[in-house]
Image (cartoon, helix red, strand yellow):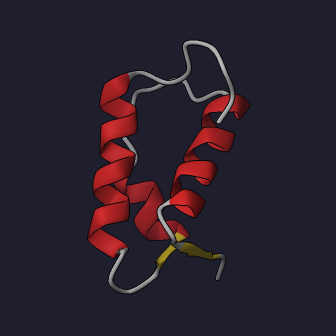
Amino acid sequence: MTEGPGMPEHIRSAILVLIDNYRERGSINLDELNAGLPSGYDWTSRDIEDVLELIAEGGLRIEWE
């Protein structure tokens, strides 16, 4: 993950919950990902990279369709 302050802890925690919820299935689709991400947060490209890295480290594939 990139160094520096990064995303707030409550955002990171929400992503880890998503990973736990879909770990057994081994994948998450974009609709599920979008629904589980906190709204009202000003996402940066770095944040998105960190989210994708957390998902990959959690062993999930992203279903793009």
Examine the rendering and report whether any part of residue 39 can be seen. no
Does residue 13 sit above or below 19 in this rendering?
A: above
Residue 8 location in percent, x, y?
41, 21
Q: Which image quarter: residue 30?
A: bottom right
- Looking at the image, which residue is at 69% across and 29% down? 2
Left or right, 59 with respect to 50, comes to left
Residue visible at 41% across and 68% down? Answer: 32
* Viewer-closest of 61 and 3: 3
Residue 24 x, y percent position in the rendering:
32, 83
Which percent across, then down, holds residue 60? 51, 72
How many badges with numbers are in the image? Answer: 0
Residue 53 seen in the figure: yes
For this rendering, which residue is in front, 64 or 60? 60
Rendering coords of residue 59 (x, y %): 51, 70
In the image, residue 16 sits, relative to residue 59, either above or below, namely above
Q: Is residue 21 above or below residue 46?
A: below
Report the residue at 35% width, 74% height from top: 22
Q: Is residue 65 above or below residue 38?
A: below
Q: Locate the C terminus and report the quarter of the image it occupies.
A: bottom right
Q: Quadrant of residue 23?
A: bottom left
